[in-house]
Image (cartoon, grey):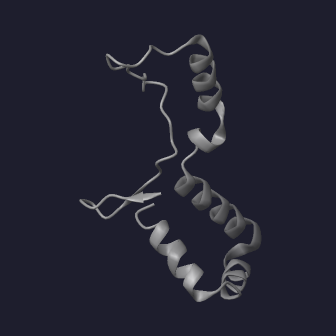
Amino acid sequence: MTEDPETGTYKDCMLMCHFEEPTATEDEEPPTEQDKRKKMLALKDPVHTVSLQQFVYEKLKAQQELLGEQGFQALMETVDTEIVAQLQEFLQGF
C-alpha cells in the first residue's frame, strides 16, 4: 500500500491490470513467450487481482453479519486499540 500525497488515500500497488502491456525501450529486448506466460499467470493470482482494502472490508463485514452487532463489537474490544485505529484509517472512505 502506498499513500497518494495529493488525495491522502492509499493505493494498492500490487494490483495488476491486463491492459498494462510492458513496453520495451530501444536497449531492451521485447518480451519473450515465457515473459508473456508469467504475466498471464500473475494476472490470475489473487495477490495481484484483489484489492487488499476491499478484501479486508469484506471479511470484517462478513464477521459482523455472522456475529451480530453486539458480538462483533465485543470481538473488536479485544483487539489492540492501535490496530483498530490503523484499520479505521486503512478502510477510510470505503
Q: Quadrant of residue 76?
A: bottom right
Q: Please report the residue visible at 64 percent of the width from the left and 86 percent of the height from the top.
A: 80
- Front in this rendered view, residue 3 or 87: 3
Q: Please report the residue visible at 60 percent of the width from the left and 23 percent of the height from the top.
A: 40
Residue 48 against residue 28 in the figure, above or below: below
Q: Please report the residue visible at 59 percent of the width from the left and 11 percent of the height from the top.
A: 33
* Location of residue 14 in the rendering, given as x and y in whole percent from the top left corner: 52, 45
**Drawn side of residue 83 relative to residue 2, left or right:** right
Count every numbered label the image shows and give the total: 0
* Location of residue 60 in the rendering, given as x and y in whole percent from the top left corner: 64, 65
**Drawn side of residue 8 relative to residue 94, left or right:** left
Residue 3 against residue 26 in the figure, above or below: below
* Location of residue 1 in the rendering, given as x and y in whole percent from the top left corner: 47, 57
- Front in this rendered view, residue 11 or 25: 25
**Drawn side of residue 10 relative to residue 16, left or right:** left
- Front in this rendered view, residue 54 or 6: 6
- Front in this rendered view, residue 13 or 58: 13
Q: Please report the residue visible at 55 percent of the width from the left and 53 percent of the height from the top.
A: 54
Q: Quadrant of residue 87?
A: bottom right
Quadrant in which the C terminus appears? bottom left
Residue 22 against residue 11 in the figure, above or below: above
| Residue extending furthest toward the left | 6
Residue 86 against residue 62 in the figure, above or below: below
Q: Quadrant of residue 28?
A: top left
* Location of residue 6 in the rendering, given as x and y in whole percent from the top left corner: 24, 59
